[in-house]
Amino acid sequence: MEYNATRESEIHTAIVSVARQSFLQRGIENTQMNWLAREVGISRSTLYLYFPSKSDLVMHVSGVLMKEISQQADEYVAKIKAPDAMTALRRRLGFFLSYFKEHTEIIRFLDKFDAIYSDEYPNVGESCRYTAAMIDSANTLYALILQGQTEGSIRDDISPNIIGSMLLNSLFGIMQRTLTRKAIIEKEHNVHVQEVLDSFLDLMLTSIAK
């Protein structure tokens, strides 16, 4: 049988699209590979030719999502020339707050992703690609922090990697906690979640300002 690159690409795109929608709406655990194969219109054995395991597919979809979000953050920051790196950093992190407020299904997916892969990523091919995508995204943030340290708007007594890791993990952690439980948080603590997130971002950035 003659190899058809276009057909191969179409099948791959369809698998990722259906899996992405299912992971976000139904959840990772409730998405079965045989169901995905039927939705795409291929056999399960064919599906496994593209993604040898469900973990491969989960890692691939996660990498696609994070790359898309990072690219959108880059574009958002680039729209307005910031006077300094601290302002650009605030704009980038503020984008994440706004984005995930409008896409809580992705926050829920990432929360479940973190719960499933809480120790080490599975030993699958997609893990390396996912890790590389995450490193690329983080490096963009680290470079921005280093720029701020060089120009004097960000404290320089802590490495850019540590500051960046603190900012990202803290911000995503509080978003996972508050955005997925917004009604409960607001009722239990008599606060508006958006005000909590905005204030949290202010506190984090104040702590690294020079």
Image: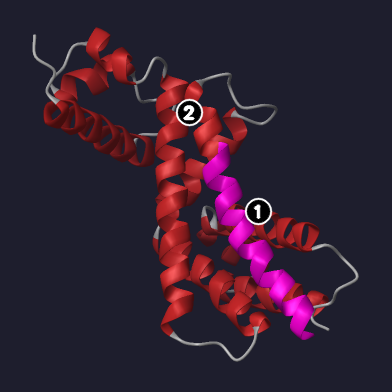
- Residue 173: which numbered mark, if any? 1
Foreground label between 1 and 2? 2
Residue that lies at the very extreme toward the left in this rendered image: 1
Verify whether residue 139 appears in magenta.
Answer: yes
**Regarding mark 2 in the picture, which secondary structure is present there?**
helix
Q: Which amino acid is tagged 1?
A: Gly
Q: List the residue tagged with mark 2.
A: 126
Residue 159 in percent (x, y) is at: 83, 62
**Range of residues picked out in magenta:** 131-153
Residue 125 in percent (x, y) is at: 49, 23
Give the CA distance from mark 1 to mark 2. 24 Å
Q: Is residue 190 left or right of residue 203?
A: left
Looking at the image, tell me whether mark 1 or mark 2 is earlier in sequence order.
Answer: 2
Q: Which amino acid is tagged 2?
A: Glu
Query: Which residue occupies the foreground of this view, 124 or 101?
Result: 124
**Structural crowding at the residue carrying mark 1, measured as other residues with C-alpha within 10 Å and reported as few (<14), some (14–19) or many (≥20):** few
Residue 102 lies, with reference to residue 18, above or below; the image says below
Tell me what residue is drawn at x 16 percent, y 27 percent: 5
Name the image quarter holding the C terminus.
bottom right
**Regarding mark 1 in the picture, which secondary structure is present there?**
helix
Residue 47 in percent (x, y) is at: 27, 17
- State the count of labels: 2
Query: Which residue occupies the foreground of this view, 69 or 135?
Result: 135
Marks 1/2 in contact by CB < 8 Å: the verdict is no
Verify whether residue 7 appears in magenta.
Answer: no
Q: To which quarter of the image does residue 8 belong?
A: top left
Q: Most prominent secondary structure in the magenta stretch? A: helix
Q: To which quarter of the image does residue 205 belong?
A: bottom right
Residue 29 lies, with reference to residue 187, above or below; the image says above
Name the image quarter holding the N terminus.
top left
Q: Is residue 59 visible?
A: yes
Q: How is the image coloured?
A: secondary structure
